[in-house]
Image: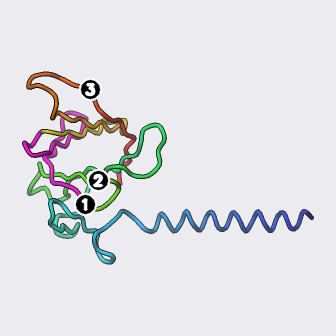
Amino acid sequence: MSNMKKIIICTFILLILFSCKTLSNQLGPPSASPSGPRTIILNGNKISKDKVGGFVSWYCKDYVYGGKVLVEVGYFGDFSQPNLGFILYDGGFSGEKSHYARQGLNHRWNWGPNGSDYAFIVKPDATGLYYDFTTVPNGESTKAMQVYKCFQR
């Protein structure tokens, strides 16, 4: 194969790869609404980012392998409810409301039937830690069940 043909084929492949990357960046985070402002569903209720002053969030992937978004945690930009946050499952737009708090340098979300059955912490180095306290006796500590690498949106 001539050098000219190789250059044309390589250029064509690079154009395809770059156009796919650009398209995925333009799609943005998942939303319950196909158009307009991002909308998420928490506990069955639709919440538009315009109604809550926007979303401040982190999307998290497997710490070692990366891959797809596994969880997104965040809070609302409207500080009239400063302790209200959310957790979205499976890289989608639906999840649950949670209690949000800034604890020192860490961001922490608690949720579940009793309000603190589960916890997710994002540390300053963007490490995400998931805790399940449903099987831990009261007063005892536990280690994180899963570790994630998080990125702020």
Label 1 with label 3: CB-CB less than 8 Å: no
Going from N to C along the chain, the mark reached first, 1 or 3, is: 1
Mark 2 and mark 1 lie on one chain; the one further toward the N terminus is 2
148 displayed left or right of 20 = left
Q: Secondary structure at mark 2?
A: strand
Q: Observer-nearest residue: 49 or 141?
A: 141
Residue kind at label 1, given as amino acid type: Ser
Residue 135, how many percent across, how many down? 16, 31
Q: Is residue 99 in the magenta section?
A: yes
Are discs 2 and 3 less than 8 Å apart at CB?
A: no
* Kind of residue at badge 3: Lys
Of 16 and 77, the residue lying toward us: 16
The quadrant holding residue 96 is: bottom left
x and y percentages locating residue 121 in the rendered image: 25, 38
Q: Are marks 2 and 1 in contact (CB under 8 Å)?
A: yes
Q: CA distance from mark 2 to mark 1?
A: 6 Å
Q: Secondary structure at mark 3?
A: loop
Q: Residue furthest right?
A: 2
x 23%, y 51%: residue: 87
- Residue 54 magenta-drawn? no
30 with respect to 24 (left or right): left
The magenta span reads: 94-116
Rounded to the nearest angstrom, the CA distance separating label 2 from label 3 is 21 Å
User: To which residue does mark 3 refer?
Assistant: 143
Say which residue appears at 17% left-offset and 33% top-offset: 133
The circle drawn on residue 89 is 2
Image position of 121 with respect to 85: above or below: above
Q: Residues within 10 Å of mark 2 (few under 14, many from 20)?
A: some
| Circle 1 residue | 94
